[in-house]
Image: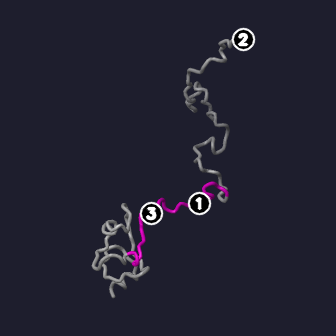
């Protein structure tokens, strides 16, 4: 059939031309007083920030994006577990409630970093609580 003949227009590109450096003299090809930037205007004079959209503040991209008030603000809540007094009802009297002891008893998962005890339910025996607890639990413990 028809064989494709090698032509100059079909040759593969083997050279990469360097980036044109503007404003480096008339011999560089982009050396006149505008240096390929056109005439006048903000973009002809200096660098324009990528997010700059003029003075239209109401519809600008920055105003449309919701504020991120503190990166990772709620990260501390991820490792926190809340227990109620009713969850501690099966523990023996005089049991020292710490993060490690609750993990050993199986009330908390391995890797839990924080725990807080709230006053839901009742613990009929006296416990020694050494983790953060709500004010109501502290009052019940004092009685």
Secondary structure at badge 3 equals: loop
* Relative horizontal placement of residue 18, taking residue 76 as reference (left or right): right
**10 Å crowding of disc 3: few (<14), some (14-19), many (20+):** few
Q: Is residue 114 left or right of residue 46?
A: left
Determine contact: label 1, label 3, CB under 8 Å: no
Q: Which mark is residue 99?
A: none
Task: Give the quadrant of the C terminus.
Answer: bottom left
Mark sitting earlier along the chain (3/2): 2
**Start and end of the magenta stretch?**
59-87
Please tell me which residue is depicted at 29% across the width and 80% down the height of the picture: 93
The image quadrant that residue 81 belongs to is bottom left
Q: Is residue 30 left or right of residue 83?
A: right
Marker disc for residue 1: 2
> Mark 2 or mark 1, which has the lower sequence index?
2
The N terminus, quarter of image: top right
Residue 11: x percent and y percent? 62, 17
Q: Which residue is mark 1?
A: 66
| For marks 1 and 3 on the same chain, the one whose residue lies earlier in the sequence | 1
Residue 65 is a magenta residue: yes
The label nearer to you, 1 versus 3, is 3
Q: Give me the residue at 58% from left, 32% from top.
A: 22
**Disc 2 vs disc 1: which is toward the camera?**
2
Residue 61 quadrant: bottom right
């Amino acid at each position: 059939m028809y064989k494709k003949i090698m032509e100059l227009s079909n040759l593969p590109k083997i050279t990469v031309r360097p980036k044109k450096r503007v404003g480096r003299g008339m011999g560089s090809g982009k050396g006149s007083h505008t240096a390929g930037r056109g005439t006048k205007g903000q973009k002809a004079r200096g660098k324009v920030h990528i997010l700059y959209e003029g003075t239209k503040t109401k519809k600008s991209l920055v105003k449309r994006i919701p504020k991120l008030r503190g990166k990772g603000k709620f990260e501390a809540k991820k490792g926190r577990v809340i227990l109620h007094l009713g969850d501690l009802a099966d523990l023996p009297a005089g049991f020292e409630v710490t993060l490690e002891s609750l993990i050993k008893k199986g009330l908390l998962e391995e890797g839990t970093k924080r725990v807080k005890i709230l006053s839901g339910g009742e613990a009929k025996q006296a416990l020694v609580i050494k983790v953060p607890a709500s004010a109501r639990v502290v009052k019940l413990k004092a009685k």
